[in-house]
Image (cartoon, helix red, strand yellow):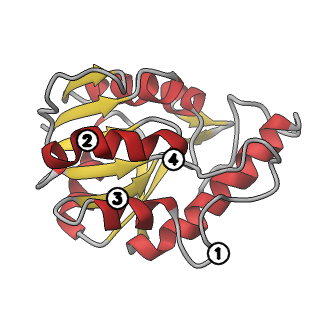
Amino acid sequence: MAHLSIIGTGNMGQAISGLAAKGGNSVELMNSTETKPVTGDIVILAVPYGSVADVIAQRGEQLAGKIVVDITNPLNFETFDGLTVPADGSAAAVIAAALPQSTVLKAFNTNFGGTLVAGTVGAETTTVLIAGDDADAKALLAGVVTAAGLKAVDAGSLKRARELEAIGFLQITLAAAEKITWTGGLAVTN
């Protein structure tokens, strides 16, 4: 079993905490301003993208040697018309550059909290897409996901984070426009 530290106590932090605990993993859930040390082998950044730089400034040294999972969608929430990272990059790439001694993965950004809690998207089992450059780190996170009864799909290298962020952006804008529900979303089938 894995030990997870989740930074961020909002909807997604709570959902991922419950998912990890359901699978028998140990979890510490903390808000982004707490100063207690991060002890997890896997650290989930469950904060808005605009808060990530502050978390890294406060905890960068503590994240060295750990698997850091970026769940953010760097959406321009003022205009809802695009992502706030360069067209050839991603939030995950920015985070990886800021944490060169950590193994950065992109995951959970294409899921709504409700689908993680319910374990389904419509009639389909919730699928968590995972991108990253370290096969062992992806396998460890996939084990956390599948132990809770969800599906995990290796979405490729960390370069695929850009596409995952575009999917997350699309899904959020559809929900905000009430074209889909916040308890629904996009499903992956095989």
Q: Residue furthest bottom?
A: 88
Q: Does the rendering let one see residue 146?
A: no
1 or 2: mark nearer the eye? 1
Q: Are marks 3 and 2 in contact (CB under 8 Å)?
A: no
**Are circles 2 and 4 on residues that touch, CB within 8 Å?**
no
Q: Earlier in the sequence, mark 3 or mark 2?
A: 2
**Residue that mark 4 sits on:** 72
Corner quadrant of residue 94: bottom left
Discs 3/4, front: 4
Q: Amino acid at mark 4?
A: Thr
- Residue 148 location, x and y as percent? 34, 33
The residue mark sitting in front, 1 or 3, is 1
Q: Residue at x 83, y 47 (%)?
A: 79
Label 2 belongs to which residue? Answer: 43
Q: Is residue 25 above or below residue 83?
A: above
Tell me which residue sits at (16%, 32%) in the image.
38
Quick check: 130 above or below 26?
A: below
Give the residue pinned by disc 1: 87
Q: Earlier in the sequence, mark 1 or mark 2?
A: 2
Which residue, given by chain and number where applicable, does mark 3 sit on? 105
Q: Is residue 8 visible in this depiction of the protein?
A: yes
- How far apart marks 3 and 2 lie (CA) works out to 10 Å
Distance between the Cα atoms at labels 3 and 4? Answer: 11 Å
Query: Is disc 4 placed on a helix, strand or loop?
Result: loop
Going by the numbered disc 3, the residue's amino acid type is Leu
